[in-house]
Amino acid sequence: MSTLATAAIRDRIRGCLFGNAIGDAYGLATEFMSTRVAKELYGNGPIAFGTDPGYPVWEDEHRPITDRNDFTDDTDQMLVMLQSLQQTHDGILHPVNFAQRLTEWGDHGIIEIGAEPGRGLGYTVGRVMSHRDFSSNPHRAAFEVWDSTGRELAPNGAVMRTAVAGVERFWDEHQVVENAMAAAKITHADPRSVVSALISSVLISRFLRGGGLNAAEDQGRVWNPKLTQAGYHRELLSYLERGTNLQGDRSLNPTYNETPESEFEPKNYDKMEQERLLKDAAAGGTYRDQFKDHNWPDWNKDRPKVTLRDDIGWVGIDNVGEDSAAGSLARSVIADYKFLLQQTQVAPPSNPSHRVQEQWAAEMESMCFPQSLRQLHLGASDSIGYTFKCIGVSYYGATRRQDPSPTAPEYGGGEGLFRGLMEQVTIEGGDADTNCAVMGSLLGARFGLQGGIPENWWRNLQHLDWLSETIDAYADRVLADYEAHAQNH
């Protein structure tokens, strides 16, 4: 159970999911840029967001002015997972339902807000969604795509959407683990991608249970009692093998345990489209409508000259140090679940004298607790989407101390830490929207929305009303389940 009051849990749920959307929207400013280019365009910040001043986001075909303060496919897919869980409302992530929801998103987008179908769809997710078995056996589809590429790709498309898996049944870590694995494996078979999603979800759930406030108390808690039970490690390792050819037909064609309640229910597209158009008309149009006469050839014409700030307002990510309680909690998650990498048989063919699995586990640990941000090489063009970079910078950011003496007040407290981390990670470039989305979800789960995320940022997100209604309805249902569980135990 959680040591937090219900109101505090609710604020952290909202912080987690809004944090994902805000990080996603903020990081778009440098997505796919090298570190050098990002720094040429933005110096050492700040980057304008919400109504806060800063260097305007560079305009190009990937980031038109109409996308300011808007989230991307990372948050789209998280919301698709949320909608799948809301439909089944049994606390279990049903892979077939989620796969069919993703297909619906690929065909129609998030129709409630007019988001383009499958916007920003990544290479791996796109290939898996096109597989003939995706809608009926998604774990096999993901494996066959991974296998066909030499079993080398470990992208971040699973971890970017996993925040909601840390919220659903947050008080039951075993279910959090199973949901995270189930969701990750519908598009990503590489254990590195799956475990990245798992450790992100588990850390979120432990924050929601009151972890990260007192290291000594956390060390005395049993987060997942099943970890000490005989056979549990083998059970999770077997789950990693679902959809693979390691156990022949039994693993290639796993049972999905679908129920009548989990059968996919398509949205009423025409009705939702009409409701959205009427709502937009009543509001006097959308954010995008104001740019219908925007003169595209004049992109970036009046952009201010970039100069470096002598003082960025706080000591910075590498100098602020690790928060002892948050750091200890994060290390406990790695310690509890790194066996999944060390012992899995789902791996590329290798020389018997060199098992890549141990290398994977060591790399994950070193990237989650680096000596500096630069060590992660976030802007390196040949590996920007590597899942360990994303979970690494997210763990690194989420375990930082609050600056006790910032030189600018807006960098104080949890809210100020969120601001400063977003600035510095975004200016590293690479897959910045995904890196910031995952880091934002962890920070939001740690500090909450109120006082944990700059209010001017989240109140100026596009689609705020719909997003708030969606997140609040989800939080209401999760907390009702939590309170019912508490009464029965």
Image (spheres, rainbow, N blue to C red):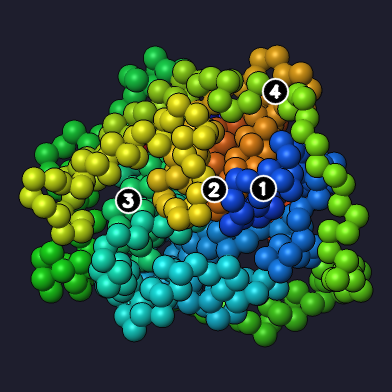
Of marks 3 and 1, which one's residue comes earlier in the chain?
A: 1
- The residue shown at (70%, 23%) is 314
The CA span between labels 4 and 1 is: 20 Å
Q: Are marks 1 and 2 in contact (CB under 8 Å)?
A: yes
Report the residue marked by disc 3.
192
Disc 1/disc 2 C-alpha distance (Å): 9 Å
Q: Position of residue 251 (x, y in %)?
A: 16, 67
Specify the amino acid type for callout 1.
Answer: Ala
Image location of residue 18, percent across then percent down = 64, 48
Q: Residues within 10 Å of mark 1 (few under 14, many from 20)?
A: many
Q: In this figure, which residue is indicated by the disc labeled 1?
A: 38
Give me the C-alpha separation between circle 3 and circle 2: 20 Å
Q: Nearer the viewer, mark 4 or mark 1?
A: 1
Secondary structure of residue under mark 2 = loop
Circle 1: element type: helix
Q: Is residue 361 visible?
A: yes
Q: Nearer the viewer, mark 3 or mark 1?
A: 1
Q: Position of residue 315 (x, y in %)?
A: 65, 21
1 or 2: tag closer to the N-terminus: 1
Decide which of 16, 470 is in the foreground and name it. 16
Quickly name the residue at label 2: 379
Q: Residues within 10 Å of mark 3 (few under 14, many from 20)?
A: many
Which structural element holds mark 4? loop
Foreground of the two, 140 or 232: 140
